[in-house]
Amino acid sequence: MCDFLLMALRVWGGPGRSSDHFARSLGFADKTAFHSKCYGFIEALESGKGLDFSDMSVAISLARVAVFDDYYGAGSEWATVTGFSSEEANVMLIALEAISERSSG
């Protein structure tokens, strides 16, 4: 599942597009801060450090946008970009949310 989350977060460095407005709506100062946080999540996951509950919640939310939003994320191109169907992605997102919830306490 970590590979799936990494794949979803990497969309933000490729077909996903952000703007300052989008980034601010998610609580970031601007799109530079948004991308910096995404890359930080990727680095933490790749290094095996993992993410705390708060960061995992944000990462899962960003993954959900990457998967299902046609404007900001990969959306209808998700399967083409990643090889995962939207249905498979949704199952993985739900599982990640459940794991994150259990880990939080």
Image (cartoon, grey):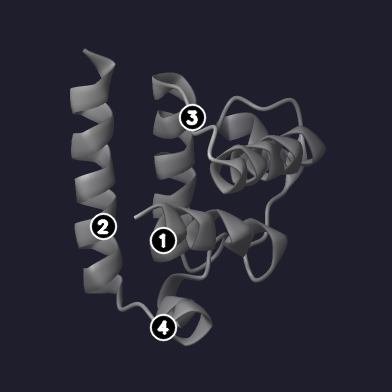
Tell me the CA gap for discs 1 and 3.
15 Å
Quadrant in the picture for residue 86 = bottom left
Q: Nearer the viewer, residue 50 or 30?
A: 50
Disc 4 residue crowd, few under 14, some 14–19, many 20+, Cα 10 Å: few
Disc 1 residue crowd, few under 14, some 14–19, many 20+, Cα 10 Å: some
Numbered disc 1: secondary structure: helix
Q: Nearer the viewer, mark 3 or mark 2?
A: 3
Find disc 4 in the rendering and name its residue. Answer: 83
- Earlier along the polypeptide chain: callout 3 or callout 4? 3
Q: Amino acid at mark 2?
A: Met
Q: Residue at x 60, y 37 (%)?
A: 44
Tell me the CA gap for discs 4 and 2.
14 Å
- Residue 92, numbered circle: 2
Quadrant in the picture for residue 20 = top right
Numbered disc 2: secondary structure: helix
Find disc 3 in the rendering and name its residue. Answer: 51
Tell me the CA gap for discs 3 and 2.
17 Å
Numbered disc 3: secondary structure: loop
